[in-house]
Each structure stands twice: as C-alpha cells, then as structure tokens.
Amino acid sequence: MTVLVAGGTGFLGTAVVRELIRSGHDVAATWVVEEERERLASETVELIEADLFDPDAARAAVDAVDDLEAAVNLVGGFADGPKLHETDPAEFDRLMRLNLKPAFLLARAAVPRLVERGGGAYVCVSARTALRPYPGGGAYSVAKASVLALVNALDVEYRGDGVRCNAILPSVIDTPANREAQPNSDFSKWVKPEGIAKVVRFLVSGDSAVTSGAAVPVYGRA
C-alpha cells in the first residue's frame, strides 16, 4: 500500500516522505522543480512529475499509484500583504488558487480510489492563521480557511465510506527560506518539519482510525 505525497520534494515534503518511509510505508511523491528531486535522491520513493493545478495531471498522478492507501497534499504558498480592502484582486485570486485548487484536485482524484478500496486517509495543510488571522495576512488567512472548509466538506461526504479527511495547521515552519525571510526571529519557537511529519504519519496510519474532520495544531512554541 502506498501513500501519495503531493509536493513531496519541498522542505516539509521531504520530511514527510522520509518519516513515512521510516515507518514502513511505500511512498510516491509528486514534483515540479527538477532541482528539488535531489532532496530525495537517497530515498526509496517513486517520483511522479505532476502539476497539481491541472485536473488531468492530478488524476494521472493518482492513477500512477497502484495501491493507494492515503493522499497527502502539501502544495500551497504564503504571502503577506496589505489590509483586505487594499488587496489586489489578482493577488487574492492567486493565493486562493495556490492553496485551495491543488487540495481540491488531489481530493477529487484520490478520494474515489480510497472509497473503492474501502477507506483510507486524505491529509492537507491549512495554517494557524486560518483560525487566528493577523493584520496584513487577510488574503492568506482566507485562502487557508478555505482549505479547512474543504476538509470539513470531505469529512461530511466520505466519512461513511471509511475515508478520514484531516488538516494540519502549522505556524511558522523552520525552513531555510523562512529563516532568510525573518532573520531576526527566534527560530527555536518555530515548528520543525520533522515534527509535523510525525503528525502526518499518524493521520495516514490506522492509529488515527477514529479521527476525521480535524484541524490539528502543529504550532511548535510560536
């Protein structure tokens, strides 16, 4: 049985892939940036090139996995900005598309497979700001809140089919890119990718059989 990790070559994605492999799962991971493939060069993982913003590509990525037991969507993105009334509509659309569309398209392709096999897990990434917005992050907060709405809708529609649908809510993840963007922050308070990966591993495993429709905080100390 295989877990499909969309965005599996990113900083969080590589941590999730490695944790799943260490725990005994077979793993497939989607990628779009050639250079990022090197992050998983030492791992036994099936790499699938896929643009998760394209419905056919999302479907093809899922179809490439023979025995799908779970799907994890880590595709998304962050941006600060002005207050909502000053936000450019194009930027609002970009953040909604960046964070919601891959989560929807992966679920659209993967959930029927999970229903067919009698159950499984779907996990995606929202953010703490979906519950606790802050000034200047309004558009991003709305986009991540829409991911929670998607998870809730999936839970209502597919829980009876044995498909568990959950979201994780990180605060600031301790990655090189975030350290560069916020060099004066206290990095010790940020959540490590490896810590989030353990929560994802739990949510795709049978140990989370009674958990669905959850928004799981993974805040670290921030």
Image (spheres, rainbow, N blue to C red):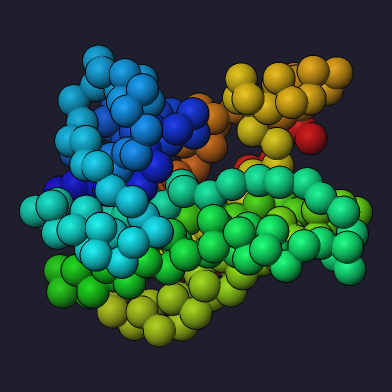
* Quadrant hosting residue 173: top right
Q: Which of 4 and 197 is in front in this view?
A: 4
Up-down relation of residue 131 to residue 157 (above or below) = above
Q: Does residue 53 appear left or right of residue 192 in this picture?
A: left
Q: In this view, does 135 lie to the left or right of 23?
A: right
Residue at the (9%, 53%) spot, across then down: 66
Q: Is residue 211 visible?
A: no
Q: Look at the picture and state if 86 lies above or below 180.
A: below
The x, y position of residue 74, in whole percent, is 46, 47
Q: Count every numbered label the image shows and give the total.
A: 0
Q: Vertically, is 43 above or below 202?
A: above
Tell me if residue 5 comes above or below residue 148 in the rendering. Answer: above
Q: Quadrant of the C terminus?
A: top right
Closer to the camera in the image, 49 or 65:
49
Tell me where residue 135 appears, x and y as whole percent. Answer: 90, 54
- Give the residue drawn at x 36%, y 79%: 158
Residue 101 appears left or right of 219: left
Residue 217 coordinates in the image, percent (x, y): 65, 50
Please give the name of the residue rendered at 37% of the width and 33% of the height, measured from the top-left corner. 33
The residue at the point 16 percent across, 74 percent down is 116
Image location (x, y in percent) of residue 105: 37, 66
Check the image and name the residue furthest to the left. 66
- Specify whether residue 155 is in view: yes
